[in-house]
Image: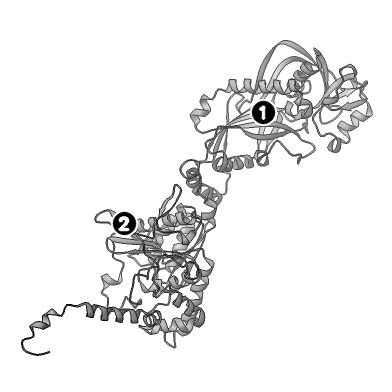
């Protein structure tokens, strides 16, 4: 009858992952093993051959970690990359080639060293990983060269007690191989490498067959081995089944012609492939997670072989701002495989938001609006249920936004919450709509030497930049968002009209800036120096790592700009970081309440005064020579 494959769903899960991560487009055969045993019931209608997920792991032919009631077969998996490849594959030639290899194993004596090589199979498979469907076809290749006739039960051989005990009493502990010889008038059971033709009573094997009068499928390769290695034309074989009474003895006579057989019939009883559809069996959340990673896995096949998807997945990102930029950045992060996000904002979703901020809907605006951070986190979770995402409703304390006695305790609490968030995240992204709201996260990012990225929008232009390392980490470092300023940040919302208070930009600008920021982040995470990578550096296949990218939508142009850290910077300079370490909240409170404190602390006030004197000395006073009125 032949073997009937029983493939555990776990096998296809392992195969799918292995194809994405290891096999990719390779057509090389992959080792796999399978297992068969004696039929436990007379009602079983086929010789079952089982393959599980563990059987596709590397080194699958080695090891002996299995149920002692099962016996191993050796196989190869052939990965085909298209349905057309599957259809056009020369299946006959493959079966012939496999049997040629079997002949070599027989003639070289390798079968005696490992008799499990007598049970052979291979699998053709096409994996549709988008739909989690697998087309496959097993072939249990065998050389059929004998006429097999039943001649009776085991009592016709008069086997000795030691042989019978090994087969039916102590099989779990004593029978480690499925094929043996019986010598000395049925009294001695020996492995194949000890078979003596002159003393041979019969051959013996563990028979998976369930037909009461026919031997199981392994009889074909076993009898072929006997004809070639023992030089006999006829041999008796004991077929050991679930019990003494169910076992049979057959006589194999060599024929002049041989056939190569073994292709498995499909459930309809016709020769043809089978289909495994796992989509209905998989948990929807696991299915979503697997499908979302598919594009990244496929990138590694050809375009980005060095893409470290596990690093991206493990990198935790804090998005400071959950509005127009925050929504765009978060969606792009999901596409790149980031799976640990924290959304931070203090606003609520308004009716004007959903058309520009892609994570919000009309329902989020009702009843005064949901908190933006929580609504954004909820939307991201609905897109990818397996995402590790949190929404934090927090007002960032800012320079120029005064702290009173009534608000001091809450401000102190907000500072500590922000500090803890930045300390525990790997990446901080500044995506707020005011300059001063970026100051404290910039300072804390420098203090903890975090990878900080910034995106800012004008009406039709954008700026994306990465901050350099903290001042304690690198002497020659890149500047931060505030390094080009000679004034400290102040309350930018004071005395502003409505159009100045809102982020009024061309609608296509935020997705562009958000995408550039995330692309820059991915490159930095693949650079060995991280946030210390020099401006203009590059990563293989991912491209350059600029310090700043400035884009201008009207001209459809962008430029790369770089600048060193400013020693008098009000946010990332060593003086500011050291003062924060020394004075903590007291320092911050002075920054919030005293407009000129940061400028005095960093030396900007003195720098500006000196610059004014220099400018005055450089002025041209030639006109005073025309002072006819004697006013000077």
The mark that comes first in sequence, 2 or 1, is 1
Q: Is residue 359 visible?
A: no
Q: Is residue 148 above or below residue 30?
A: above
Depth check: 162 or 108 in front? 108
Label 2 secondary element: strand
Q: Label 2 vs label 1: CA separation? A: 60 Å
Left or right? Give the position of 286 relative to 328.
right
What residue do we see at 46% from left, 57% from top? 524
Q: Which residue is mark 1?
A: 121
Query: Residue 95: where, in percent of width, then height?
Result: 62, 22
What residue do we see at 64% from left, 29% from top? 122
Q: Quadrant of the C terminus?
A: bottom left
Left or right? Give the position of 28 relative to 201.
left
Indicate which label's residue lies in the foreground, 2 or 1. Answer: 2
Depth check: 109 or 335 in front? 109
Label 1 secondary element: strand
Left or right? Give the position of 6 relative to 283.
right
| Quadrant in the rendering for residue 145 | top right
What residue do we see at 60% from left, 42% from top? 13
Disc ID at residue 559: 2
Q: Residues within 10 Å of mark 1 (few under 14, many from 20)?
A: many
Query: Residue 333: where, in percent of width, then height?
Result: 45, 56
Q: Residues within 10 Å of mark 2 (few under 14, many from 20)?
A: few
């Amino acid at each position: 009858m032949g073997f009937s494959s029983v493939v555990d769903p776990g096998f296809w899960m392992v195969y799918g992952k292995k194809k994405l991560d290891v096999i990719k487009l390779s057509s090389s055969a992959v080792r796999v093993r399978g297992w068969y045993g004696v039929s436990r019931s007379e009602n079983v209608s086929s010789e079952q051959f089982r393959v599980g997920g563990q059987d596709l792991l590397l080194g699958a032919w080695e090891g002996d970690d299995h149920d002692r009631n099962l016996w191993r077969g050796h196989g190869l998996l052939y990965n085909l990359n298209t349905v057309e490849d599957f259809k056009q594959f020369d299946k006959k030639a493959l079966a012939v080639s496999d049997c040629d290899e079997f002949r070599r194993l027989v003639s070289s004596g390798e079968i005696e060293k490992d008799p499990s090589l007598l049970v052979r199979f291979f699998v053709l498979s096409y994996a549709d990983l988008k739909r989690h469907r697998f087309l496959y076809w097993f072939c249990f290749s065998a050389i059929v060269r004998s006429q097999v006739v039943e001649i009776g039960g085991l009592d016709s051989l008069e086997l000795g007690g030691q042989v019978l005990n090994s087969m039916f009493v102590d099989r779990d502990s004593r029978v480690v191989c499925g094929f043996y010889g019986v010598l000395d008038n049925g009294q001695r059971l020996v492995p194949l490498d000890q078979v003596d033709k002159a003393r041979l009573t019969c051959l013996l094997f563990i028979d998976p067959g369930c037909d009461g009068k026919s031997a199981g499928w392994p009889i074909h390769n076993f009898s072929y081995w006997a004809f070639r290695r023992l030089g006999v034309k006829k041999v008796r074989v004991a077929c050991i089944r679930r019990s003494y009474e169910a076992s049979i003895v057959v006589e194999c006579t060599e024929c002049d012609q041989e056939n190569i057989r073994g292709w498995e019939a499909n459930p309809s009883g016709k020769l043809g492939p089978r289909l495994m559809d796992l989509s209905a069996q998989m948990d929807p959340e696991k299915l979503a997670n697997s499908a979302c990673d598919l594009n990244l896995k496929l990138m590694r096949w050809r375009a980005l072989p060095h893409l470290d998807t596990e690093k991206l997945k493990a990198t935790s990102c804090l998005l400071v701002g959950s509005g127009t930029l925050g929504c765009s950045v978060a969606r792009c992060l999901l596409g790149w495989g980031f799976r640990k996000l924290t959304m931070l904002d203090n606003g609520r979703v308004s009716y004007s938001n959903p058309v520009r901020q892609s994570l919000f809907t009309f329902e989020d605006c009702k009843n005064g609006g949901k908190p933006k951070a929580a609504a954004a986190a909820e939307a991201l979770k609905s897109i990818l249920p397996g995402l590790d995402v949190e929404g934090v409703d927090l007002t960032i304390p800012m320079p120029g936004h005064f702290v009173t006695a009534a608000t001091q305790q809450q401000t102190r609490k907000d500072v500590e919450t922000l500090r803890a968030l930045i300390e525990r995240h790997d990446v901080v992204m500044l995506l707020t709509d005011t300059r001063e709201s970026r100051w404290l996260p910039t300072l804390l990012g420098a203090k903890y030497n975090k990878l900080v990225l910034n995106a800012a929008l004008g009406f039709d232009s954008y700026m994306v930049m990465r901050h350099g390392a903290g001042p304690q980490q690198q002497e020659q470092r890149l500047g931060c968002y505030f390094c080009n300023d000679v004034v400290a940040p102040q309350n930018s919302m004071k005395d502003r009209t409505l159009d100045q208070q809102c982020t009024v930009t061309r609608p296509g600008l935020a997705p562009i800036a958000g995408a550039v920021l995330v692309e820059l982040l991915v490159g930095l995470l693949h650079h060995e120096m991280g946030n210390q990578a020099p401006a203009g550096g590059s990563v293989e296949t991912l491209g350059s790592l600029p310090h700043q990218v400035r884009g201008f939508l009207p001209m459809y142009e962008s430029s790369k700009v770089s600048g060193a850290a400013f020693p008098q910077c009000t946010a990332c300079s060593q003086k500011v970081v050291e003062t924060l370490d020394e004075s903590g909240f007291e320092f911050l409170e002075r920054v919030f309440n005293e407009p000129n404190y940061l400028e005095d602390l960093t030396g900007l006030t003195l720098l500006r005064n000196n610059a004014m004197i220099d400018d005055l000395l450089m002025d041209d006073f030639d006109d005073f020579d025309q002072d006819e009125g004697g006013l000077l």
